Amino acid sequence: MTKYLKSYDIKYALIETCLLLALCSTLFALGGFFAVHSINQSQMEELTDFSTELKEQYQEHGLDWILDDLELDERPIWGRAESLERLDEHDNLFKVVQSNNLLLGSELEFDADNVAKWQLLSFDSERQFELLTIRIELDAEVTVIILQPKSYESAFVTGVVWQLYVYFSFIFSGCILGIVLSRRYRKQKWIASTKKVLSEIAKSPDSTRLPISRKCPINNDIVNSINTMLDDITELHGTMKTMSVGIAHDLKTPLSRVANRLQSMRHDISEPSLIETHLNHASNDLNSVISTFNNLVRLNSIESGQHKDKFVKLNLSELIDDLALSYEPVFEDSGRKLELSTVSDVYCVGEADLLSQLICNLLENALEYSDVGAHVWVRLQSHTESALLQIGDDGPGISPAAQPHVFERFYRADISRAKPGNGLGLSIVKAICQVHGATLTLLPNQKGAVFNIEVPISGQ
């Protein structure tokens, strides 16, 4: 548990850290953007005010007074190298032009608009400068063009934002790398653990299953699929074992009888009447074996779904009525009463022979295992999307312990072991229901054996 909590906490701590870093970096980005934008906007407003003031002073005092006031009375000229050096040192760059002649300032070729705005200028192939530019026309002949680098405040905030971005990027990348490595480690560990459990499953496939892992929930779908497959294989294996035992049992008894009859025929070879008796009994036993194999072939044929090609729309009400009427004399002769109650014109899609065998098997089951004087009924009711077919009797029924197994192949409850049969009748009923998309239920807590079958219906 401690190991699990540690792995679980590390995983989600890394995820929470990544989310927190993403949130913090977003907030810093927004804050830095607004701060830089505000500083740059303020710098633009200051330069615009300066241009207005410069025009007023020029009109009032003239150019010489302005140059003297700005301590530019020596009228410096900056060449290319000196101009770029000033920009590198974060100094302003400007030039004053009169009648297209440079009076003072930079010899670099640059121009600007009459309003202050930021531009990305390149004076060589290696460097670019983001500069605030403005063109000030003092009169028709004199023009001042100013290039102003970003203020120290803007440069400082931009640098801090970039440093924080780099810092957060390293941490964020580290967390992502940690999550990736953690997932890979857990995946490899899960694969190794799964291989170990599968090796154990190979030794005891009926009892061992892959555990559901809370550490790797993404793999649980695979685990559930594998466990379901193993359950199906186990069920199939159990069915095969039951079939093998059932077939062996159902073959052993009649074949042993046939062998005994043949042995008896050797002793009674001189007495024709006894030979005929032995032959009749041997024939009956062999017919029992053939019947078992025929039922197995029939069951496998039904389960394979090959009969679906013969499905047609048929009147289920008429089919049940005809079968019940044919069985009424049989029930009367056996001292039992058969009651029929059906709704007319109930239609379904299926094969008449299979549905007839389903009903006959259940009626034969009631005829074989109900008490003399029992009440047996066949009822058909129509619902919105299905029809309910119920076939039952009032005793003695099936024990609660045997009810979960009655549809298994070759299963025979204690009450039926002394009677002829191979334990395939109800298995065939179940297979017919499945191939028709019907639901078969043995109702619990009943006095007798009551079977409910919900059959999908079709319109007329």
Image (tube, rainbow, N blue to C red):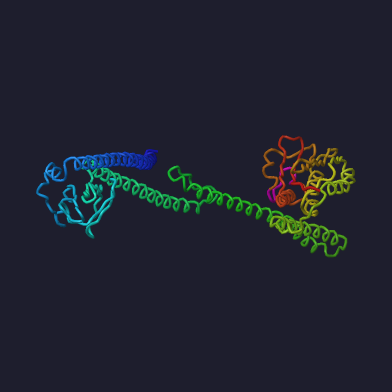
Q: Nearer the viewer, residue 215 or 276?
A: 215
413 falls in the magenta region: yes
- In the displayed structure image, the side of residue 325 where residue 97 appears, left or right: left
Count of marks placed on residues: 0
The residue range painted magenta reads 408-417
As displayed, is residue 425 above or below residue 394?
Answer: below
Q: Nearer the viewer, residue 366 or 187?
A: 187
- In the displayed structure image, the side of residue 158 where residue 455 appears, left or right: right
- In the displayed structure image, the side of residue 230 where residue 140 appears, left or right: left
Task: Specify whether residue 4 is in view.
Answer: yes
Q: Nearer the viewer, residue 19 or 118?
A: 118
Q: Quadrant of residue 443?
A: top right
Task: Specify whether residue 133 is in view.
Answer: no
Q: Quadrant of residue 30?
A: top left
Task: Give the overall secondary structure of the magenta segment.
Answer: loop
Which quadrant: the N terminus? top left
Residue 267 is situated, as x and y percent measured from the top left of the image, at 80, 62
Residue 54 is situated, as x and y percent measured from the top left of the image, at 21, 42
Residue 66 is situated, as x and y percent measured from the top left of the image, at 15, 43
- In the displayed structure image, the side of residue 323 where residue 207 appears, left or right: left
449 falls in the magenta region: no
Residue 309 is situated, as x and y percent measured from the top left of the image, at 74, 59
Q: Quadrant of residue 367?
A: top right
